Image: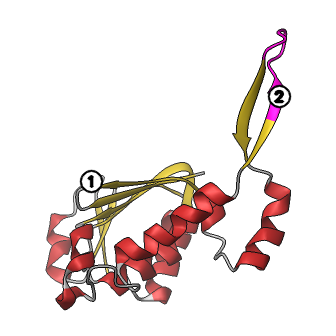
Amino acid sequence: IFSIDVLPECKQYEEERITIEIGSQTDSIFLDRLCYKYAPFDMIIDDGSHINSDVIYSFKHLFEYVRSGGVYIVEDASTSYWPDYGGGINKKESTIEYFKTLIDGVNFFGEFSERTIPNTKEIVNTLYRKDKELIEQIQRNGYTGIDVQIESINFLNSIIIIIKR
């Protein structure tokens, strides 16, 4: 387990299997160094500043380093509604609104098709992604690329759980 904090005194909580790195969640050089050292990650829990722009910045920077099937959790997402943290109801720059925009990408990059179940004559409709067509769709529709890496986004009370595809 490793943790990030801006307060140097947090180093005192290190143990044999717990490492604490001191730095900011919005310092790209610091984050790059950590990703080089520790990635890929099974899970990231963002319990950082809770400032909406910081949460979004960290996600955009770190999500690519989460392994397939891994989890990214944003904690205290209720700050999306707090003006002092850069939030507000339906405010485009808030954490909640940012993740809501990714939902379209999660669902958009699928296609229904019919297929026959092997060794039966049963025909079923399935939803699947056509990965080789995604790049063209991303360019045409202005998606960030993060969209195609997400299997699911779950909104709970003040928590967002993103599962990597």
Q: Which mark is residue 16?
A: 1
In the depicted structure, whether residue 119 falls above or below residue 114? above
Number of other residues with Cα within 10 Å of mark 2, as a class: few under 14, some 14 to 19, many 20 or more = few
Please report the bounds of the magenta region as a residue range. Answer: 114-122
Is residue 152 shown left or right of residue 49?
A: right
Number of other residues with Cα within 10 Å of mark 1, as a class: few under 14, some 14 to 19, many 20 or more = few
Identity of the residue drawn at 73% across and 43% down: 128
Looking at the picture, which amino acid does disc 1 mark?
Answer: Glu
In the depicted structure, whether residue 50 falls above or below residue 20? below
The quadrant the N terminus occupies is bottom left
Distance between mark 2 and mark 1 Cα atoms:
52 Å
Looking at the picture, which amino acid does disc 2 mark?
Answer: Arg
Identity of the residue drawn at 26% across and 84% down: 88
Between residue 89 and residue 119, name the one nearer to us: 89
Between residue 161 and residue 121, name the one nearer to us: 121
In percent of width and height, residue 129 lies at 74, 49
Q: Secondary structure at mark 2?
A: strand
In percent of width and height, residue 23 lies at 33, 84
In the depicted structure, whether residue 95 falls above or below residue 161? below
Q: How many marks?
A: 2
In percent of width and height, residue 81 lies at 23, 78
Could you tell me if residue 61 is visible in this image?
yes
What type of secondary structure mainly makes up the magenta span? Answer: loop
State the image quarter where residue 86 is shown: bottom left
* Sequence-first disc among 2 and 1: 1
Is residue 44 shown left or right of residue 141?
A: left
